[in-house]
Image (cartoon, helix red, strand yellow):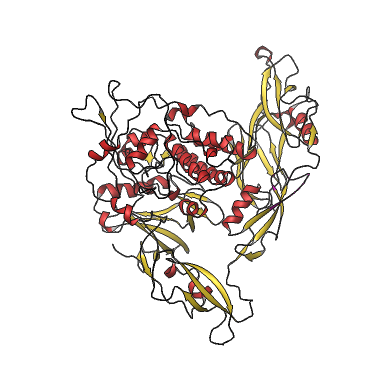
């Protein structure tokens, strides 16, 4: 394999170091001399340059991502697809860890943190799907987590183009790692956008529980569970998980694609509803009881072993392989065990021989001779046989390794200047012990002793204990100092994730507030921006809402929508859904409210209303408005978003969102001229306002 370190690619990219190696490509960190920034360059391995299928798949990634521009998708800057030149893609440099590595360290995440990352992935998928791109390989190894908590979806190498038959020929049969593929991918049939939602459901299951929904000793066993098995709900493994989270995950993982979410946006909206209401019920629980309309394939381990052909081992345990279409099983042939419901098989054990990231290559059904009609299970060509022993890392992720390395000499080196963050020592982790040194032999921060000693052979990842000289009687600080991130005005879960990404720990305290909504951060100690040691604890003050928790619902009947909204806000409540209904009452006035007048409810409760609408025959023609009267505009301040409504219509649909979170989505009458949305944020956030589906404001705004 050619090493490009020290070379300049394309006359502008100075290659500095290797940052990742996978089955088909090597990723380098490089410096762009034209734009003066660091980038990541993904170079196709030399052995695959002459393979047209690999070159098409490699170039397919650049084509797919070039169509996309979204904060949660790794950006493509440049591509080289020329003869007599190395094939490479120039990408955004993302410095962080893969979700897979993060899960290995954390084992499992809280449901709030799972929502935080999953919503970002759903936003990325919604954007990709809106451009006709199906990722087809969503898994934790392909999700990068940055230090600020941003999740980035990467590796569109087997993405397909929903509206391009020519492009789909390259990858229409490609599937991802066996544990995350959808049933339709396993069968080799045409996949649509919903296949990504199935994979996201599996990823969420793993984040919530620390275990995969399906495990087995072979790839065959895992694939058959995708087709025949319903896993237990996540809350049966981690009881703290809310019911709605169970429903979201299981709804996404329906074996029958027609019973899953119809879009990533619908899935995102359910997650957003859950984020604001942990007691939410979605009533999806019965959907998973029905199998796909096509009868699932019966699994027989003995048959599968008997018909397993020999294949060459792949280089990368996460490399995506290919499957042809699975033949349907005749109704007269052997069917699954009695009952049409999928049956759960026990979750995996950490000591399973079959590696959890093992990909699958082929599924085929075949009749067994002389078996009285007994069906021989389709054959799956299991790629990466060598990878089971080697445990090669993913393209941008890393896996467990048994590689042996030799411990170098650290004694005499300054830890901060020569060892910490030095890529030469990335095979090791370090435990730091400070020791006062009065000998004068070592300078402050230098290594006095190491354990194990120089020359010792150890496994990659072994922890090396370094004893550091402290010549200032304990004042040496070899730890990393980081600023407290901006968390004021964020939900506690988002603040917790931001602190965790910065290497800090959150300690929650609560305080009532008349201005900050319940569950959102009022202040923190130390203050935002203060430099503190990595690992320090930040006290986060979270609002419990108004001190007067019980509010009386006012009588809204006869009010206009704006009057009702104002009355609710004065009562410490919020306006919920707004519907219209033909009525003999005055058009534009409230005829019904979802919470009865006088009911005692918690502060901040949303009360929906129904507005009277004139009967069709009573509709009068409004005089034509002057040209330009249909124009809407927006004013944004640190606490209020004001929408100036168009006057060429009676009502319009207004939506307001900040960083993708919907703050308002309702129908308003335009006769008042304006409508408002109160906000409580700090720092810069993306504000999007639409009127009747048309975006009239889409900008970053600094709330101070």
- Badge count: 0
Quick one: 201 or 125, which is closer to the camera?
A: 201
The N terminus: image quadrant = bottom left
Quick one: 461 or 636, which is closer to the camera?
A: 461
- On the image, the x and y values in percent for residue 515 come to 76, 45
Q: Residue at x 63, y 77 (%)?
A: 474
Q: Is residue 97 above or below residue 519?
A: below
Q: Is residue 160 magenta?
A: no
Q: Which residues are magenta?
A: 508-520
- On the image, the x and y values in percent for residue 400 come to 40, 57
Q: Is residue 518 magenta?
A: yes
| Left or right: residue 414 compared with residue 453 | right
Q: Is residue 55 above or below residue 12?
A: above
Q: Is residue 307 visible?
A: no
Q: Is residue 680 visible?
A: yes
Outermost residue to the top = 617
Outermost residue to the left = 370
Q: Where, by quadrant of the figure, is residue 224 drawn?
A: top left
- On the image, the x and y values in percent for residue 533 come to 62, 66
| Left or right: residue 239 compared with residue 626 | left
Q: Is residue 278 above or below residue 69?
A: above
Dominant SS of magenta comes to: loop
- On the image, the x and y values in percent for residue 576 come to 69, 31
| Left or right: residue 359 compared with residue 574 | left
Quick one: 460 or 540, which is closer to the camera?
A: 460
Q: Where, by quadrant of the figure, is residue 619 drawn?
A: top right
């Amino acid at each position: 394999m050619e090493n490009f370190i020290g070379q300049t690619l394309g006359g502008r990219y100075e290659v500095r170091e290797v940052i990742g190696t996978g089955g088909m490509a090597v990723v380098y960190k490089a410096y762009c001399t034209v734009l003066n920034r660091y980038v990541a360059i993904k170079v196709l391995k030399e052995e695959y340059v002459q393979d047209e299928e690999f070159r098409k798949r490699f170039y397919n990634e650049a084509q797919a991502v070039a169509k996309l521009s979204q904060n949660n998708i790794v950006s493509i800057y440049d591509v080289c697809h020329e003869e007599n030149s190395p094939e490479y893609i120039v990408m955004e440099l993302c410095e962080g860890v893969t979700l897979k590595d993060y899960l290995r360290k954390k084992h499992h995440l809280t449901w709030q943190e799972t929502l935080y990352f999953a919503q970002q992935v759903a936003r990325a998928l919604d954007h990709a799907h809106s451009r006709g791109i199906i990722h087809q390989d969503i898994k934790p190894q392909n999700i990068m987590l940055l230090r600020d908590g941003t999740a980035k979806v990467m590796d569109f190498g087997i993405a397909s183009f929903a509206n391009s038959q020519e492009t789909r020929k390259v990858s229409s049969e490609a599937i991802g790692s066996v544990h995350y593929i959808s049933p339709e991918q396993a069968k080799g049939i045409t996949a649509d956008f919903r296949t990504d939602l199935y994979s996201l459901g599996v990823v969420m299951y793993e984040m919530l529980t620390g275990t995969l929904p399906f495990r087995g000793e072979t790839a065959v066993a895992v694939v058959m569970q995708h087709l025949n098995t319903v896993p237990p709900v996540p809350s049966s493994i981690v009881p703290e998980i809310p019911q709605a989270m169970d429903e979201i995950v299981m709804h996404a993982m329906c074996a029958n694609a027609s019973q899953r979410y119809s879009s990533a946006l619908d899935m995102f909206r359910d997650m957003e509803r859950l984020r604001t209401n942990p007691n939410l019920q979605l009533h999806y629980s019965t959907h998973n009881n029905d199998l796909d309309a096509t009868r699932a394939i019966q699994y027989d381990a003995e048959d599968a072993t008997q018909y397993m052909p020999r294949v060459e081992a792949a280089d990368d345990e996460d490399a995506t392989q290919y499957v042809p279409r699975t033949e349907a099983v005749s109704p007269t042939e052997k069917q699954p065990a009695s009952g049409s419901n999928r049956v759960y098989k026990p979750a995996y054990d950490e000591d399973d021989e079959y590696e959890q990231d093992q990909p699958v290559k082929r599924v085929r059904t075949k009749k067994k001779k002389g078996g009285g009609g007994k069906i021989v299970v389709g054959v799956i060509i299991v790629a990466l046989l060598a990878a089971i022993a080697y445990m090669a890392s993913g393209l941008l992720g890393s896996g467990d390794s048994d590689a042996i390395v030799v411990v170098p000499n650290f004694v005499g080196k300054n830890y901060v200047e020569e060892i910490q963050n030095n890529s030469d020592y990335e095979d090791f982790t370090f435990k730091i012990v400070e020791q006062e040194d009065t000998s004068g032999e070592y300078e402050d921060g230098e290594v006095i002793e190491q354990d194990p000693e120089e020359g010792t052979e150890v496994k990659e990842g072994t922890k090396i204990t370094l004893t550091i000289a402290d010549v200032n009687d304990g004042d040496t600080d070899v730890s990393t100092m980081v600023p407290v991130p901006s968390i004021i005005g964020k939900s506690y879960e988002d603040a917790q994730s931001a602190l965790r990404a910065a290497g800090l720990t959150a300690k929650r305290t609560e305080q009532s507030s008349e201005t900050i909504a319940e569950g959102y951060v009022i202040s923190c100690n130390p203050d935002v921006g203060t430099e503190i040691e990595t690992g320090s604890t930040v006290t986060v003050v979270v609002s419990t809402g108004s001190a007067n928790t019980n509010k009386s619902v006012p009588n809204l009947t006869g009010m206009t929508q704006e009057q009702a909204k104002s009355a609710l806000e004065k009562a410490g409540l919020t306006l919920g859904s707004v519907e219209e209904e033909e009525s003999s009452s005055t058009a534009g006035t409230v005829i019904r409210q979802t919470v009865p007048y006088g009911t005692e409810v918690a502060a901040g409760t949303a009360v929906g209303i129904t507005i009277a609408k004139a009967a069709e025959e009573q509709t009068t023609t409004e005089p034509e408005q002057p040209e330009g009267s249909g124009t809407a505009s927006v004013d944004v301040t640190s606490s209020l978003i004001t929408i100036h409504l168009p006057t060429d219509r009676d009502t319009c649909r207004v939506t307001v969102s900040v960083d993708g979170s919907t703050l308002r989505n309702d129908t308003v009458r335009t006769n008042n001229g304006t409508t408002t949305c109160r906000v409580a944020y700090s720092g810069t956030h993306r504000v999007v306002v639409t009127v009747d589906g048309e975006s009239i404001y889409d900008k970053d705004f600094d709330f101070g």
